[in-house]
Amino acid sequence: LMYRPDRIDIIFDSASKVGLPVWAGFSSRNKDGLIALTTDYEYSFKKMISNVKHLKLDAVGIMHCDISVIEESIKELKEVYNLPIMAYPEVAVFNFPHYDMSNVIQPNDYLVEAKKWKDAGAQIIGGCCGTKPDHIKQLRELIDQITKESNIKTYQNSKSIETMEALKTEYTNLHDKYETLETTNNGLQQQNSKSIETMEGMKMKYNEQNQQ
């Protein structure tokens, strides 16, 4: 979780030397627009996520923040990055020194929200503070939905390919028929031409005989 802009370069320089994928997570809140979770309460979320744009990252995301800001945060991440996006919201309220778990979102409602994040552009979805195994289990249905959509798209693409191949075959057959007709037509024209020549020859011979 990146919340100190002055430490970002140091942290990611160290992380890049490990040889593993590097993901950058950010947190945001809503205060007349998205602001980042930092020691500076006027630091915009867009400015915060742009601080690491020059670094080689494998994924970026929004985490450790209320569900209400997830969709908007994903949209801003997409405006800055063309990378896989993760969403790890918290569902409990922190009242120092403990988390208040009395009003945690139900797992089935969490799935409803997760579908919105997926539609907004998130490819990696999990949970942060307050989420339990039951919340994560519900995401299985989202995976099934994505798999189903992928299968449908694959099926549609295969049908499109089949249709294109059928059209191609039909075009080839029509083209072959056209070539055959054209060859036949040329043959008939040649025969007509020969017939005309024969008729002209017979006419000339007839005229010559009459003249004699």
Image (cartoon, rainbow, N blue to C red):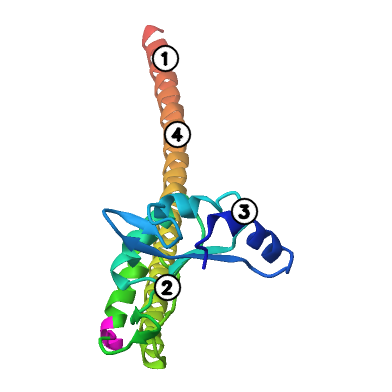
Question: Which of the two labelled residues, at mark 4 and mark 3, occupies the earlier sequence position?
Answer: 3
In percent of width and height, residue 23 lies at: 57, 66
Question: Which of the two labelled residues, at mark 1 and mark 4, occupies the earlier sequence position?
Answer: 4
In percent of width and height, residue 91 lies at: 33, 80
Give the camera-side residue of 151 and 10: 10
Q: Can the viewer see residue 13?
A: yes
Nearer the camera: disc 3 or disc 1: 3
What whole-number distance in Å separates the C-alpha atoms at marks 1 and 4? 20 Å
Question: Which of the two labelled residues, at mark 1 and mark 2, occupies the earlier sequence position?
Answer: 2
Q: Which residue is mark 4?
A: 191
Nearer the camera: disc 4 or disc 3: 3
Please report contact status of discs 4 and 3: CB closer than 8 Å, yes or no.
Answer: no
Q: Which residues are magenta?
A: 104-109
Q: Which residue is mark 1?
A: 204
Q: Amino acid at mark 1?
A: Met
Give the camera-side residue of 88 and 197: 88
Asked which secondary structure carries label 3, the reply is loop
Mark carried by residue 55: 3
Nearer the camera: disc 2 or disc 4: 2
What whole-number distance in Å separates the C-alpha atoms at marks 1 and 2? 105 Å
In which quarter of the view is residue 66 placed? bottom left
Q: Which residue is mark 2?
A: 64
What crowding class fits label 4: few (fewer than 14 Cα within 10 Å), some (14-19), or many (20 or more)? few
Look at 38% across and 56% down and name the residue there: 41
Give the camera-side residue of 162 and 77: 77
Looking at the picture, does residue 85 appear above or below residue 186? below
What whole-number distance in Å separates the C-alpha atoms at marks 4 and 3? 79 Å
What whole-number distance in Å separates the C-alpha atoms at marks 3 and 1? 95 Å
Mark carried by residue 167: none
Q: Amino acid at mark 2?
A: His
Q: Can the viewer see residue 81?
A: no
Q: Amino acid at mark 3?
A: Leu
